[in-house]
Image (cartoon, grey):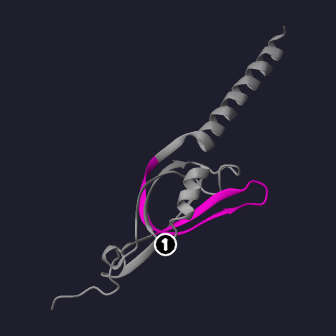
Amino acid sequence: MKTGKKIGIIATLVVLLALAAFIYIKFYFVFGSGVKAGELNQIVYKGWIWKTYEGRLIQTGFKGAGRSGSIQSNEFNFSVVNKAVADSLMRCSGKNVELHYKEYNGALPWRGMQKYIVDDIIAVTENTPENTIPLTIPIDE
């Protein structure tokens, strides 16, 4: 075998290994995981080619950098791969939920539109006045 042909084969193998490593890190490596809590706004089953479960969680909290005492709403958009988890979430719309998720560096069309994949429901509570944040905050003078 000629030296040029050996170098070409080695270079091709190195490029293929680098491409495989990039794809694994971008789409299959779990970058992080955690728990998010808030009011489940929606969970839908949609898609043109690959139908996936997509959801939105509304998290409320106090805005730290802006005006003091103002309330802001943060959205946590996620996908669900497990049909049993998605079916359970569809019965929880409007309730406060705690969801365990895995974060990937990139989204795959057959896994969902988001890089956050919910894999478990930790807790579900009714959205009652005792569980909500008041719209007005009393200020002691």
- Asked whether 43 falls inside the magenta stretch, the response is yes
Q: Tell me if 33 is positioned left or right of 105 in this view.
A: left
Residue numbers of the magenta segment: 33-58
Residue found at x 23% / y 87%: 138
**Above or below for 52 versus 73:** above
Q: Nearer the viewer, residue 108 or 22?
A: 108
Residue farthest left in this picture: 141
Question: Residue 39's x, y, as percent?
Answer: 45, 69
Horizontal placement of 68 versus 104: left or right?
left
SS at mark 1 in the image: loop
Report the residue marked by disc 1: 94
- Tell me where residue 116 sits by quadrant: bottom right
Q: Quadrant of the N terminus?
A: top right
Q: Main secondary structure of the magenta part?
A: strand
Tally of numbered tags: 1
**Residue 135 is inside the magenta segment:** no
Residue 8 percent location from the top left of the image: 79, 21
- Above/below status of 59 relative to 81: below
Q: Residue at x 62, y 43 (%)?
A: 27
Towards the viewer: 140 or 124: 124
Mark 1 is surrounded, within 10 Å at the Cα level, by few (under 14), some (14 to 19) or many (20 or more) other residues, namely: some
Which image quadrant for residue 37? bottom left
Residue 22 is situated, as x and y percent measured from the top left of the image, at 64, 38
Q: Nearer the viewer, residue 32 or 64?
A: 32
> Residue 60 placed where, x, y %?
40, 73
Q: Is residue 119 left or right of residue 70?
A: right
Vertical placement of residue 76 versus 94, above or below: above
| Up/down of 100 relative to 141, above or below | above
Residue at 82%, 16% (x, y): give it. Answer: 4
Residue type at the position of mark 1? Gly
Quarter holding the C terminus is bottom left
